[in-house]
Image: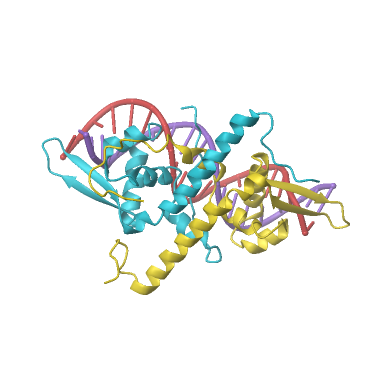
Chain colours: A yellow, B cyan, C purple, D red
DNA sequence: CTGTATCCAAACCGATACTG
DNA sequence: CAGTATCGGTTTGGATACAG
């Protein structure tokens, strides 16, 4: 993509605000992580809690219900002796995987950059 | 505004989740949009406000300052008679473009799906 | 034009305790 | 195991008014 770094009058506004629709579904700091850990396959409530130790049960339930209501994931109750519930990505939920992967890749780059430059690098100075 | 946006932030990014590093930089519901509109080239404060009508001046300033402090974008003051300020993506900021594009693509799909199915059925239920 | 200050509402998060 | 209830704390966002 030819990126012009000079003045740009936005001759062609790319889109209105296409991010808004998606970001409204990704509401919440833990939502991307939940989708990420669900990408490998359906998981149970306790497994998700173990995957994301810092999350509380209330918040996890809240995000799960929210994502379920939005059709991002499904919820299946297994009528076993100890009740167990499985969550998994719906067809819509799998759509997020490329974006999540891209975000993960950026996080990796940032971590590498920080590790290479110590802490004096926050600007965009390419490594000389 | 008819469009309701949810906020998105990471209070204490857990180390276990690769998304946290990047999501902490993408904190705020408007941040992706700002990066998106800056992808075409540097823009001024008023232009960004015009691009994203639903954002308030306080929030835009806040996100801008935050992204500047994180090295995602730069800020240049033009000492003109009416003061004008330009913002642009740094090298680090351009790293986010793939992720933003992926999110935009998802928003597109969601919009298409909603348009096709109306509003009665956008759920993707598993073949239970 | 660019930004800041203040007030206020809403959403998110955490910890604990408790139920089926 | 899976969840809910409640309390409170923190952050973000919007609106308005005001300042450089």
Give the image quarter of residue A116.
Answer: bottom left
Give the image quarter of residue D19.
Answer: top left
User: Could you say where residue A126 lies in the image, as x and y percent from the top left?
Assistant: 29, 66
User: Could you say where residue B80 lies in the image, as x and y percent from the top left?
Assistant: 12, 39
Residue B12 seen in this snapshot: no
Q: Residue at x 39, y 45 (%)?
A: B36
Q: Is B30 on the left or on the right of B41, as rendered?
A: right
User: Could you say where residue A14 lies in the image, as x and y percent from the top left?
Assistant: 39, 38
Residue pushed farthest left? B81
Seen from the viewer's position, the closer of residues B47 and A95 is A95
User: Could you say where residue B57 lies in the image, as x and y percent from the top left?
Assistant: 33, 36
Q: Is A123 on the left or on the right of A63, as rendered?
A: left
**Can you say whether B43 is above or below A35 in the image?**
above
Q: Is A90 on the left or on the right of A120, as rendered?
A: right
Residue pushed farthest front? A2
Q: Residue at x 50, y 46 (%)?
A: B103
Seen from the viewer's position, the closer of residues D6 and A13 is A13
Q: Residue at x 61, y 53 (%)?
A: A35
Seen from the viewer's position, the closer of residues D14 and A113 is A113
């Amino acid at each position: 993509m030819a990126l012009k770094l000079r003045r740009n009058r936005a001759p062609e506004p790319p889109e209105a605000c296409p991010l808004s629709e998606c970001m409204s579904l990704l509401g919440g700091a833990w939502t991307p992580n939940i989708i990420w850990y669900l990408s490998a396959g359906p998981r149970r409530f306790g497994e998700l809690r173990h995957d994301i130790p810092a999350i509380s049960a209330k918040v996890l339930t809240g995000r799960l219900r929210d994502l379920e209501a939005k059709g991002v994931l499904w919820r299946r109750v297994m009528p076993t002796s100890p009740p167990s519930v499985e969550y998994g990505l719906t067809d819509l939920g799998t759509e997020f995987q490329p974006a999540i992967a891209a975000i993960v890749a950026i996080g990796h780059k940032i971590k590498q950059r920080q590790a290479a430059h110590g802490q004096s690098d926050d600007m965009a100075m390419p490594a000389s």
